Image: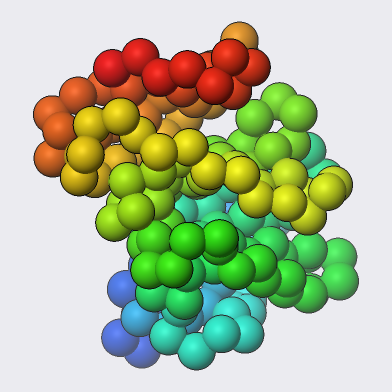
Amino acid sequence: DGYFTKYAIPHNSIPDNLTVDAKGAVWFLASNKNSLYRVDSKTFSLKGYPIPTDNGNPKSLSVDQNGHIWFVESIANKIGKFIPEQEAFYEYELLTQFANPGKISIDKHGKIWFVEVTANRIGMFSPEQKRFDEAIIPTPSSSPVALVNDDNGNVWFLEYKGNKVGMFNPKTAMFHE
């Protein structure tokens, strides 16, 4: 209609990361408030959901095929899942301590992939098995910062300090940089 709509969010929130689910709801995080927020695209109402672990520093959002919202908690060293219909959070502790999880992505099989910035790894969580797997990136101290899955099952990532683009093939467990 040519007009902008302004949404009031909690005072001093710093909104970050944004995704839209299959129903059109807009989701975002405010890490300084340790909360996940939902904007209903039909009613324009805003609702916040405090993340259970205090000061987890939530980052990066992705929506799975079931409409569940996934994110990482970089300081808490966890990945989290929010089920909107239940308004319930589930959190999963990473295998490696102080891994500093970052960017998250979901493959076509529903596996949750993420970078482990300080651990120099690619992590994967299988929701069905409630199991983590990790792969160490060949370039030491490369600081992986971004990650995406392609249609062939490969995991692409950026190595900030390694100054490289990397690809991990889960079937062969091989890296290419």
Residue 3 pos. (x, y %): 41, 49
In the picture shown, does residue 67 fall above or below 164? below
Q: Nearer the viewer, residue 7 or 30?
A: 30
Q: Nearer the viewer, residue 108 or 129?
A: 129
Residue 79 pos. (x, y %): 58, 62
Q: Residue at x 47, y 61 (%)?
A: 96
Q: Answer with the quarter of the image where residue 12 lies.
A: bottom left
Furthest toward the top, the residue is 152
Q: Nearer the viewer, residue 50 or 100?
A: 100
Q: Residue at x 39, y 51 (%)?
A: 116
Q: Answer with the quarter of the image where residue 170 lies.
A: top right
Q: Residue at x 47, y 76 (%)?
A: 76
Q: Residue at x 28, y 17 (%)?
A: 177
Left or right of residue 21: residue 2 = left
Left or right of residue 91: residue 7 = left
Residue 32 pos. (x, y %): 35, 81
In the picture shown, does residue 63 fall above or below 37? above
Left or right of residue 115: residue 14 = left
Is any part of residue 99 visible from this angle?
yes
